[in-house]
């Protein structure tokens, strides 16, 4: 089962992620961070950037692979995931942009881009720690409900719900939100050595409960985390509200011996 950590706010979640990532970088200076866009990981990236600066951590060899990209959106568009990752991760952390990869959403090459992306991750040695957000419909990456739990990186059609949710990044105009994307598959995500899923706010409560305590089903793609040997789910009280075993998760974390590790 995933470890569930219930925090009081996003900053606390960010500090837990940052400590974990810093330990990883210290142990493996050329580690591969799996990166996500959206609102959920922002506090985590901010906390890691602050730690990198305060502790003078050398990140010159750290590599990254992002989860997804919109199809057919110019990478220079401010809301492309290439631009977003540059703005929220590469620049604040001071990573080498050449070592940070985002799936290629160019329509001319998109038919083969997924397979090439998976091959590149594999050739690099695999993702060490993948950060994930979760959609209100339970998606991870852009694997919408019904996505194969064994899927590799490929083209997907976004649901209307996801386009409504993401319209806030496009002047609140759903018509500007692309209809298709290229996303790491659930099978790709499960190959990462550690998964850290972050979810905040009441809007995520149902999806979080289905992920952690529901049956494993492609209808809730994030429920595939139950198949992973090292998955951590960090949520605030609002996102934890529908979890039946909330008290147990709290007790386990509050009484966690140092030797148990993250
Ligand atoms: C983003 C991604 C998506 C988001 C999810 C939640 O790269 O893969 O799965 O993590 O849509 O988005 P936020 O965090 O904005 O609520």
Image: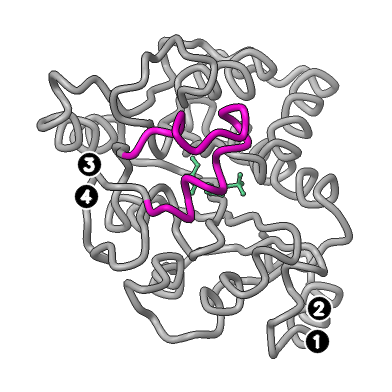
Q: Residue at label 2? A: 250
Q: Which quarter of the figure has residue 235?
A: bottom right
Closer to the eye: label 4 or 3: 3
Q: Residues within 10 Å of mark 4 (few under 14, many from 20)?
A: some
Distance, label 4 to label 2, CA atoms, is 34 Å
Q: Residue at x 61, y 27 (%)?
A: 171
Tag 3 or tag 2, which sits nearer the N-term?
A: 3
Front residue (pair 204, 229): 204
Q: Position of residue 50 (x, y in %)?
A: 81, 25
User: Which region shows up in magenta?
Assistant: 159-179
Distance, label 2 to label 3, CA atoms, is 38 Å
Q: Residues within 10 Å of mark 1 (few under 14, many from 20)?
A: few
Residues at discs 4 and 2 in contact (Cβ within 8 Å): no
Residues at discs 1 and 3 in contact (Cβ within 8 Å): no
* Mark 1 beta carbon near ligand 1 (under 8 Å): no
Distance, label 4 to label 3, CA atoms, is 10 Å
Circle 4 SS class: loop
Relative to residue 48, is residue 238 depicted above or below?
Answer: below
Relative to residue 54, is residue 121 depicted above or below?
Answer: below
Q: Residue at label 1? A: 247
Q: Position of residue 80 (x, y in %)?
A: 46, 22
Q: Residue at label 4? A: 152
Q: Which mark is residue 155?
A: 3
* Mark 2 beta carbon near ligand 1 (under 8 Å): no
Distance, label 4 to label 1, CA atoms, is 36 Å
Residues at discs 2 and 1 in contact (Cβ within 8 Å): yes
Q: Residues within 10 Å of mark 3 (few under 14, many from 20)?
A: many
Residues at discs 2 and 3 in contact (Cβ within 8 Å): no
Is 175 inside the magenta-drawn segment?
yes
């Amino acid at each position: 089962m995933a470890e569930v950590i219930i925090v009081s706010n996003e900053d606390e979640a960010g500090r837990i992620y940052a400590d974990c990532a810093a330990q990883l970088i210290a142990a493996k200076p050329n580690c591969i961070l799996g990166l996500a866009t959206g609102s959920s990981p922002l506090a985590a990236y901010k906390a890691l950037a602050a730690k990198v600066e305060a502790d003078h951590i050398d990140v010159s060899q750290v590599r990254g692979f992002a989860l997804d990209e919109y199809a057919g959106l110019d990478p220079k568009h401010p809301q492309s995931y290439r631009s977003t990752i540059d703005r929220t991760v590469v620049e604040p952390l001071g990573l080498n942009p050449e070592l940070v990869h985002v799936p290629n959403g160019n329509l001319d090459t998109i038919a083969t881009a997924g397979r090439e992306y998976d091959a590149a991750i594999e050739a690099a040695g695999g993702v060490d720690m993948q950060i994930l957000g979760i959609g209100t419909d339970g998606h991870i990456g852009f694997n919408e409900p019904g996505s194969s739990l064994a899927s590799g990186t490929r083209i997907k059609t976004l649901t209307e719900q996801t386009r409504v949710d993401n319209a806030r990044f496009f002047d609140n105009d759903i018509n500007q939100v692309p209809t298709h994307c290229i996303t790491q598959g659930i099978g790709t995500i499960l190959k990462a050595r550690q998964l850290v899923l972050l979810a905040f706010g009441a809007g995520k409560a149902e999806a979080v409960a289905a992920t952690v305590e529901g049956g494993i089903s492609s209808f809730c793609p994030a429920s595939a985390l139950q198949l992973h040997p090292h998955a951590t789910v960090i949520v605030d009280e609002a996102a934890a509200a529908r979890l039946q075993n909330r008290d147990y998760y709290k007790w386990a974390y509050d009484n966690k011996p140092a030797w148990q590790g993250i």
